[in-house]
Image: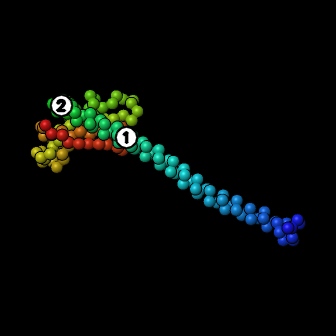
């Protein structure tokens, strides 16, 4: 059993240097690890918002699909085109994540010969398009009488 440290044991400062090197290594690894954690947390917020928007859009489309075709067709004739928002089925102005509904007759057979299915329009064929105002998310579908 030794009571006194020998020369060269911990008295020359090597233990202090080892601890200092270990702390510096941990610090050097901790910064990138915290950056990765921050990125992951930010991504989860974006993903949560995307999923929320997706379900909100799908819910509105499903709500529209249970409406009678005659009601939807009448609204399509009132709005008159692919760029006009349907006031009857869209959210009121100022709503958070406001849904805008575009409802119009779809030119499936290209009867007007302009190669644009959003102009002209066939009786008995409607396009429903729901978008989030000032957003990049949208859902659309065609319905037939």
Q: Quadrant of the C terminus?
A: top left
Left/right placement of residue 145 relative to residue 46 reads left
Pick the front one: 76 or 83: 76
Left/right placement of residue 61 relative to residue 73 reads right
Query: Is disc 1 surrounded by few (<14), some (14 to 19) or many (20+) residues within 10 Å?
Result: some
Pick the front one: 18 or 90: 18
Q: Quadrant of the N terminus?
A: bottom right
Name the image quarter holding residue 3: bottom right
For the point 19% across and 47% down, the residue is: 116
- Quick one: which residue is furthest to the right in this view? 4
What element does badge 1 sit on? helix
Res 117 seen here: yes
What element does badge 2 sit on? loop
x and y, in percent, of residue 16 in the image: 78, 63
Query: Is disc 2 surrounded by few (<14), some (14 to 19) or many (20+) residues within 10 Å?
Result: few
Pick the front one: 58 or 97: 58
Task: Of the two numbered discs 1 and 2 on the same chain, state the one appearing first in sequence.
Answer: 1
x and y, in percent, of residue 57 in the image: 32, 39
For the point 39% across and 40% down, the residue is: 52
For the point 23% across and 42% down, the residue is: 141
Q: What's the CA distance linking mark 1 and mark 2?
A: 25 Å
x and y, in percent, of residue 115 in the image: 16, 49
Mark 1 lies on residue:
53
Mark 2 lies on residue:
68
The numbered dot on residue 23 is: none
Left/right placement of residue 141 relative to residue 10 reads left
Left/right placement of residue 2 relative to residue 56 reads right
x and y, in percent, of residue 144 in the image: 15, 39
Name the image quarter holding residue 94: top left
Q: Is residue 112 above or below residue 33?
A: above
Marks 1 and 2: CB-CB under 8 Å?
A: no
């Amino acid at each position: 059993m030794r009571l006194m440290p020998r020369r060269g044991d911990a008295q020359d400062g090597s233990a202090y240097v080892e601890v200092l090197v270990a702390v510096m290594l941990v610090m050097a690894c901790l910064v990138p690890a915290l950056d990765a954690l921050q990125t992951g947390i930010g991504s989860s917020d974006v993903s949560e918002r995307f999923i929320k928007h997706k379900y909100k859009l799908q819910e509105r489309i499903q709500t529209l699909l249970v409406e009678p075709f005659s009601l939807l067709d009448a609204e399509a004739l009132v709005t008159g085109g692919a760029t006009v928002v349907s006031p009857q089925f869209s959210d009121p102005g100022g709503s958070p994540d406001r849904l805008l509904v575009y409802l119009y007759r779809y030119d499936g057979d290209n009867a007007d010969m302009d190669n644009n299915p959003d102009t002209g329009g066939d009786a008995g064929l409607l396009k429903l398009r729901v978008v989030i105002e000032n957003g990049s998310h949208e859902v659309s579908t065609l319905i037939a009488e």
